[in-house]
Amino acid sequence: MQQNLDYQQLKKQIKAWALEVGFQQAGISDIDLSEAGVYLNSWLEKNYHGQMEYMQRHGDKRYHPEQLVPDTLSIISVRLDYMQSKLTPYETLTKQPNKAAISRYALGRDYHKVLRKKLKKLTEKIATAIGPFGHRVFTDSAPVMEKAIAEKAGLGWIGKHSNLLNSKAGSYFFLGEIYTDLPLPPDRKQSFHCGSCTQCIQDCPTDAIVAPFQVDARRCISYLTIENKGPIPIEFRQAMGNRIYGCDDCQVVCPWNKFTQDTQEQDFSPRHQLDDIDLLTLFTWTEDEFLSKTEGSPIRRIGYQAWQRNLAVGLGNAKSSEEIIQALKDKLNTASPMVKEHIQWALKQLST
């Protein structure tokens, strides 16, 4: 690495290069995440993380970046839009109980791969300009407090639903980070702009946002349909409606999302009509079809059993028909014990 670099100028160049490789914004954070660490430990003490034991792993490395990656002096934070306005609106789907409501981020290619590729290009541009430098890239794949970092880097503020909000782009974007040994000047932390609005808290289907900035994952549909490996608690099944992978309700009702920007990333375009498809169509997929059609998709990570479990609950909340009832009965004999229990619940729902 060259000596006597103008780090203020390099910071400007990094932000320009970030746009060149396809990100919408970049900012710089320092490595003092102690405030976020206090919040994290309080959240863990309340067991709001549910089965996500990985949130407790690595000790305080989450809020001590220099422990996770030695010699880290600053963090480059980037964001990448993923929404497409041409899609059938999510809120339209949740009002059609026989359709599948899938979180908008999961309709196309796995964002981990897309972001990692762009982050690698960004590090290559930096290295071309200044020579080799110490760095490591992250895309929601390690003990990294990406929202706290992005807030400190000026990319947005953490809203009452705990998602990051940007005044010019809403919240439909992914975050990525580069931990580096470059002593880049940090940006100013973004100020809070939610005011007295509590729309996200009021509209959460399962009352998972138990207080501003406090999400009890054990009640959250995103957690229940993705991270949860066991049965979906009966108390939340009706509230799930047709949300079979994730939940966007708290984002849909947020006033800041009137500023949502369309993504320029073609990889995020829906595959297999997942933005507007019937629950029954998805339920009839065999395991081989599921693995084939979700290849390269974030949906694949939950596995076929959880997919069937989620769909069975969705069908139990759908408008009853002979076709749905028969499809559920047809799977009873071959389903795993967990899925079978959800199918039986669905059949009971449809018969009342």
Image (cartoon, rainbow, N blue to C red):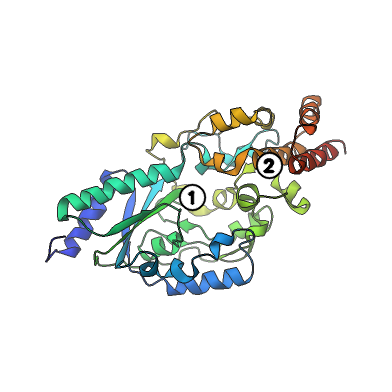
* Residue 344 point in image, percent of width and height: 82, 39
Q: Is residue 350 left or right of residue 157?
A: right
Res. 207 mark: none
Horizontal side of residue 338 vs 70, given as left or right: right
| Residue under the image location 75 percent in, 44 percent down | 338
Relative to residue 53, is residue 294 depicted above or below?
A: above
Q: Which residue is mark 2?
A: 310
Give the residue furthest to the right: 352
Q: Residue 7, located in which quarter of the rendered image?
A: bottom left
Residue 82 seen from this side: no
In the image, 338 versus 73, the foreground residue is 338
Q: Quadrant of the C terminus?
A: top right
The kind of secondary structure element at disc 2 is helix
Residue sitting at x 57%, y 51%: 253
Please give the residue where the numbered disc 1 appears in the rendered image: 257
Q: Identify the element where label 1 is drawn.
A: helix
> Which residue is found at the position 51% from the left and 30% from the top?
271
Q: Is residue 236 visible?
A: yes
User: Closest to the observer: 89 or 44?
Assistant: 44
Return the x and y of residue 185 as percentages of the image width and height: 25, 67
* Mark 1–mark 2 distance (CA, rounded to whole Å): 27 Å
* Label 2 Cα neighbours within 10 Å, binned few <14 / some 14-19 / many ≥20: many
Residue 342 in the image, given as x and y percentages of width and height: 77, 42
Q: Quadrant of the N terminus?
A: bottom left
Closest to the observer: 258 or 222? 222
- Give the residue at x 16% y 56%: 130
Q: Which amino acid does the dot numbered 1 rest on?
A: Asn
| Residue 252 in the image, given as x and y percentages of width and height | 56, 48
